[in-house]
Image (cartoon, helix red, strand yellow):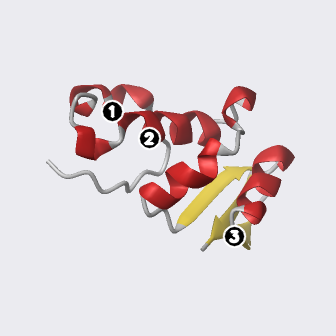
């Protein structure tokens, strides 16, 4: 297995089998899964650190997730693709 993240629609149950591998950064991945799925409790300053530790280069959120968008901009991401449903950001 490998720990590179290449996700289109993140699902937390795919993470379970590697949760005990310290190099997998399970908690960071779970936080980013919740963040990408618009869980309002996940839009915290810890997201920026998780994005950095996992070397995330692009993030897509629901278009209406303004809190998440502001958090990504504050973390140094730039606006990218915009559709009727999603807005994407890149490093």
Label 3 or label 2, whichever comes before in sequence order: 2
Q: Classify mark 1: helix, strand or loop.
A: loop
In this rendered view, identify the residue nearer to me: 88 or 69.
69
Where is residue 2 drawn, in percent x and y? 19, 52
Residue that numbered label 2 is attached to: 29
Left or right: 28, with 68 as reference point: left
The image quarter in which residue 78 lies: bottom right
- Circles 3, 1 touching at the beta carbon (< 8 Å): no
Left or right: 70, with 28 as reference point: right
Q: Is residue 46 above or below residue 91?
A: above
**Number of marks:** 3
Residue 59 got which mark? none
Asked whether the viewer can see residue 31, the reply is: yes
Q: Is residue 45 above or below residue 73?
A: above
Taking the view exactly as shown, the residue that stands out farthest to the left is 1
Residue that numbered label 3 is attached to: 76
Q: Classify mark 2: helix, strand or loop.
A: helix
- Circles 2, 1 touching at the beta carbon (< 8 Å): yes
């Amino acid at each position: 297995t490998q720990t590179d993240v290449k996700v289109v629609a993140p699902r937390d149950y795919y993470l379970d089998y590697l949760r005990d591998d310290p190099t997998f950064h399970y908690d960071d991945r779970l936080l980013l899964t919740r963040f990408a799925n618009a869980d309002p409790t996940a839009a915290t300053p810890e997201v920026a650190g998780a994005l950095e530790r996992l070397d995330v280069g692009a993030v897509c959120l629901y278009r209406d997730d303004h809190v998440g968008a502001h958090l990504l901009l504050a973390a140094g991401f730039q606006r990218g693709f915009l559709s009727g449903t999603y807005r994407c950001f890149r490093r």
